[in-house]
Image (cartoon, rainbow, N blue to C red):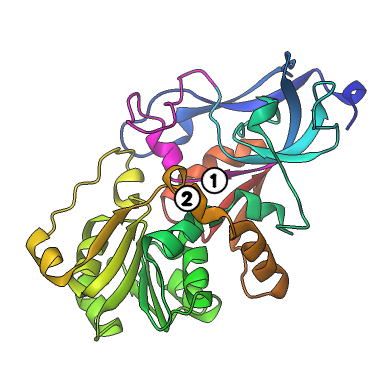
Amino acid sequence: MSASNIPATHREVRLASRPEGALDSGHFTVVEVPVPRPGPGQVLVRNSLMSVAASLRTLMKEDVGMPLPSFEVGRPLSAPAVGEVVTAPEGGTLRPGDPVTHRAGFREYAVVEADAVRLVDLTVLPDPVAYLSQGSAAWIGVVRGAEVREGDTVFVSGAAGGLGTLAGQFARLRGAGRVIGSTSSQRKADYLVGTLGYDAVVLRGAGPIEDQLRKAAPEGIDAVVDTVGGEQLRAALALARPGARVGLVGALSAQVAGESTAPVEIDTYSLIVRGIQLRGISGARHRDALAEYPETFGRWIREGSVTVPHTRLSGIDQAPRALMELLEGHHIGTVVVEL
């Protein structure tokens, strides 16, 4: 798209009010506003695809205690997006037409600081959705958090989500001997086993998680990628073998309700005796673990060793629905919206 073809207006999704409890459509408003004009050092991007994640619900609180700021009532939400540069500063490295990724989703056009966008290189990651996936978090959870090793029995909680669907595949390719997941429905369990190659799945709501997990892993668990917390984390710790590694990469049990704390009662003495390593993992503190990630992830995608499961909705007006349905557990994999 050339600068001469920029429309006068575009649509964006704003936070209408701070939710207390479950999200509904009244917490959002889709408005038509003038297309923003970039200032010095900024680029104008026409967004084509964006993703939503459970962490967005937490950012709707006024005080979230997270590295990212809370969303402001009456202002657009934000999320990872892929788009095309429309205008760029003269003398910079970006050019009109360049495909880029950034964090100003929930709008059709975005003005972004030039140093805050990243070029999309389809020769590295051949699928634009891969740039919006939680692949990097899954990679760090598997490589640095759980330290998955050859022959390990691995448990991935929240295995049908954007992170979990990739973590299970990464664990297998890192040599795991048995991969077990947890999810919320038989439909998702069938997908995990039949399509992604999970060996067993435990179901939330089908009886105590610990009992189900004990049947799925009678000899115990060597490595855990935990995206949920709560009962599922307690069950994983109860089944953890001596020396097991547990990577905490999410807290969906709290995030889906918009909470910013996720307390779990654990037996610290038992963890000490068994030498269990419990690690909170975030990408900001483990960037060095990502050095080989893009090339390896891209190669696995091209070889067909890894798929990027995702659910796609069309139209910016579907973005609120996409987030609400994700939090309600309707979708498998990364949830993306075509803009």
Is 71 colored magenta in this rendering?
Answer: yes
Image coordinates for residue 166, horizontal then vertical, percent = 52, 64
Secondary structure beneath dot 2 equals helix
| Towards the viewer: 295 or 11 | 295
Residue type for callout 1: Ala
Residues shaded magenta = 48-75
Does the image show residue 227?
yes
Q: Label 2: which residue?
A: 326
Residue 209 is left or right of residue 149, and the answer is left
Q: Is residue 96 left or right of residue 290?
A: right
- Neighbor class of circle 1 (other Cα within 10 Å; few <14, some 14-19, many 20+) is many
Rendered image: mark on residue 322: 1
Q: Residue 130 appears in which quarter of the rendering?
A: bottom right
Residue at 75% across, 30% down? 45
Tell me: 140 left or right of 49: left
What residue do we see at 43% from left, 73% from top?
A: 189
